[in-house]
Amino acid sequence: MSEHLTIRIEEIKPEGKRLEVREAFLAGKSPEGPFDSRELEITVKGEIWADLDIEKIAGVLRIKGPVRFDYEMPCARSNEPVPCTFDERLDLALSKAESALRESAEDEVELSSADLEEWTYSGEELDLTPILYEHIAINLPVKVVAERFRDAPDEVWVDAGQEEAEERENPFSALKGLKIDPSGSK
């Protein structure tokens, strides 16, 4: 847990709190860093830059602000590194967790899909590391394509090791001349 990514709930004033994040990813920067870009299959160039506004209204924490950094991701066609920029806005509301939901052996709790999507916080401190990490992981593209492949239709490109796709005869072309009797007799 990175200490400067941890906020004390009691320190959030009524007018809110501003938090500037400049954090290195683990790969190539600092082994003590909270983010490991190898899990995300990207190579980060520089630091994460985030300016977050944190407000506390009636027990709900609202965290919002831009998150930016430059990174490289392998091209889906050639595996060459493609430079990209992550620039997404974080907007998240966290409600205070009920004290262990007061579970007992007799009580059954039914959860709806809305219950499962809610972020909660508990205790006196909030670690922003998993929140930022999940925001980044969810908003990264599934695949990127290098500039030289962007205008080519999917059927045209060949693997990086091939010169040209070989022209092959369709094995079913011999069936074109075959006539079938619609009555079913031989």
Image: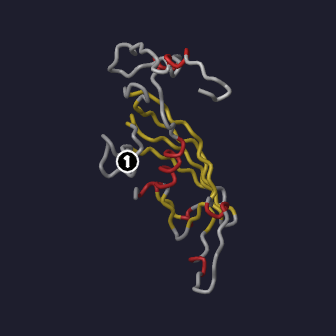
Image position of 91 with respect to 127: above or below: above
30 displayed left or right of 4: left
Closer-to-camera residue (106/85) = 106
What residue is drawn where x is 60% and y is 70%?
A: 97
| Residue drawn at the location 47% of the way across and 36% of the way down | 69
Image spot of residue 182 (x, y percent) = 67, 25
Q: Give the quarter of the figure containing the N terminus.
A: bottom left
Relative vertical location of residue 71 with respect to residue 106 in this rendering, above or below:
above
Question: In this rendering, would 166 be left or right of 106?
Answer: left
Percent coordinates x, y for residue 82 in the rendering? 42, 27
Query: Which residue is at the far right?
Result: 58
Q: Quadrant of the C terminus?
A: top right
Looking at the rendered structure, the number of numbered marks drawn on it comes to 1
Query: Residue at position x 38%, y 43% from top?
Result: 37
Q: Nearer the viewer, residue 150 or 156?
A: 156
Q: Position of residue 180 (x, y in %)?
A: 61, 22
Q: Which amino acid type corresponds to the residue marked 1 in the rendered image? A: Asp
Image coords of residue 141 (percent x, y): 51, 37
Q: Residue at x 30, y 49 (%)?
A: 31
The outermost residue toward the front is 186
Camera-side residue: 104 or 68?
A: 104
Q: Is residue 98 above or below residue 104?
A: above
Report the coloring of the rendering.
secondary structure
Q: Which residue is mark 1?
A: 36
Mark 1 Cα shell of 10 Å, populated few (<14), some (14-19), many (≥20): many
Foreground pick, 86 / 113 = 113
Element type at marker 1? loop
